[in-house]
Image (cartoon, helix red, strand yellow):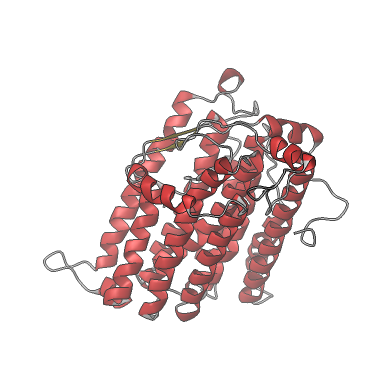
């Protein structure tokens, strides 16, 4: 982690770190599936060793989700070729494991008395990356590459709505989830993968009797309906106003201010895809979505930090270098092959995101005097070391009211698909 971090540079100010220490997680959820899954999550966390750090649980789930999706992408990079059935089954398994582990990390934090604001931030950071791969894997599994515009719409809607969920939190101070939200979306995508594994991905291209439309159009209708519900809930924020002074955000800024970073990601992505003379998006859909997805993940993480530290969000970011070069290259009639710049965008954006997250985690760990992937654990019968007890006490920042009993490190539910 230290190797990835910036050298001799601090991202968070002393005031931001102080505000972060005072942060209390607030959440309201009306999810349909969560109450039904609680027994499974409670059983799973009871089997988890007490020495296993919550953040380690989160990162293991993310890695499994990303790896299984990358395997799927290798066999169908554009969502046109039908991937082997076993890759779809692998994605279903990877997403189920990720969803389960993501649901118990907060429970493990409370169980081990190691809840901290870092847990919430780390969880959201992993979710921002996972959103990109989950949306992409679903589109590939149901052969959406045959409709490039729909593929673009579905993936970037998922990315944008994840950002909007945190935008709403930045404004109101409370994360809100509807009856049909991230858990429901995740299990719907698991179902898509299982259908592709059982009947073959080609099943989505077959026509529905009488209606005459292919089955993947049915999926598009349901997903778009889910997006519409989330957008309606999001727009209510502007009528209710923010929790800050005079209806402003938690940082005292305009409720519209987070729209700028999102626009700087989505708008160039749309323009570059539509105007590319080399059909960049159509020919390299997966690379394109991952490249812009990493940029979106970076600005989303900055928004989460702005909310937790009650600070103003910065609009410009070095992760936008890649999209800017792609845009300028088109302006000058593509003097550089677009695919070269697209791969540069992906590589640059990924390393920038990882280095940023590593630096933020290191600064928070030093401030709170805790470890990222280790927790104080005393075996039964042993006497706790005074320093260990002290660190454990400092890393427990109370139990802010989340729906599972309250913790700053809890199940994140902010990925509307």
Is residue 148 at all visible to an observer of this figure?
A: no
* Image spot of residue 52 (x, y percent): 60, 54
Image quadrant in which you'd find residue 344: bottom right
Taking the spot 57% from the left edge, 61% from the top edge, the residue there is: 60
Q: Quadrant of the N terminus?
A: bottom right
Outermost residue toward the left? 210
86 and 335: which is toward the camera: 86
166 and 147: which is toward the camera: 166
Outermost residue toward the front? 381
* Image spot of residue 292 (x, y percent): 58, 60
* Image spot of residue 200 (x, y percent): 30, 77
* Image spot of residue 44 (x, y percent): 45, 53
Relative placement, left or right, of 145 versus 366 is left
Taking the spot 72% from the left edge, 35% from the top edge, the residue there is: 394
Image quadrant in which you'd find residue 180: top left
Q: Is 202 drawn above or below residue 252 in the view shown?
A: below
């Amino acid at each position: 982690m230290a190797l990835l971090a910036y050298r001799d540079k601090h991202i968070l100010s002393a005031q931001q770190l102080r505000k972060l220490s005072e942060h209390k997680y607030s959440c309201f959820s009306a999810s349909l599936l969560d109450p039904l899954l609680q027994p499974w999550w409670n059983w799973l966390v009871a089997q988890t060793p007490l020495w296993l750090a919550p953040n380690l649980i989160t990162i293991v789930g993310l890695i499994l989700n990303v790896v299984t999706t990358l395997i799927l992408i290798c066999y169908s990079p554009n969502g046109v070729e039908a991937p082997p059935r076993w890759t779809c089954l692998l994605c279903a398994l990877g997403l189920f494991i990720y969803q389960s582990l993501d649901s118990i990390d907060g429970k493990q934090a409370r169980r081990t008395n190691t809840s901290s604001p870092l847990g919430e931030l780390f969880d959201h950071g992993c979710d921002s990356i996972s959103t990109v791969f989950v949306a992409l894997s679903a589109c590939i599994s149901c052969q959406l590459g045959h409709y490039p515009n729909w593929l673009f719409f579905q993936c970037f809607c998922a990315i944008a709505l994840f950002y909007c969920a945190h935008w709403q939190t930045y404004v109101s101070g409370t994360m809100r989830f509807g009856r049909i939200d991230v858990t429901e979306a995740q299990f719907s995508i698991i179902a898509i993968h299982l259908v592709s594994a059982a009947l073959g991905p080609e099943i989505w291209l077959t026509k529905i009797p009488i209606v005459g439309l292919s089955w993947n159009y049915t999926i598009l209708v349901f997903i778009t309906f889910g997006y519409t519900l989330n957008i309606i809930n999001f727009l209510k924020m502007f009528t209710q106003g923010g929790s800050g002074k005079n209806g402003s955000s938690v940082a005292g800024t305009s409720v519209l201010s987070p729209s700028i970073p999102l626009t700087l990601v989505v708008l160039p992505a749309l323009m570059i895809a539509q105007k590319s003379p080399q059909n960049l998006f159509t020919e390299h859909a997966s690379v394109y979505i991952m490249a812009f997805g990493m940029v979106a993940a970076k600005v989303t993480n900055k928004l989460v930090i702005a909310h937790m530290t009650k600070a103003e969000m910065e609009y410009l970011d070095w992760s936008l270098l890649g999209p800017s070069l792609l845009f300028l290259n088109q302006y000058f009639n593509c003097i550089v092959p677009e695919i070269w710049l697209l791969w540069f965008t992906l590589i640059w954006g990924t390393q920038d995101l990882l280095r940023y997250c590593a630096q933020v985690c290191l600064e928070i760990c030093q401030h709170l005097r805790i470890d990222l992937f280790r927790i104080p654990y005393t075996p039964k019968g042993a006497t706790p070391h005074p320093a260990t007890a002290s660190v454990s006490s400092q890393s427990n920042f109370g139990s802010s009211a989340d729906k599972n009993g309250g913790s700053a490190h809890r199940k994140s539910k902010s990925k509307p698909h």
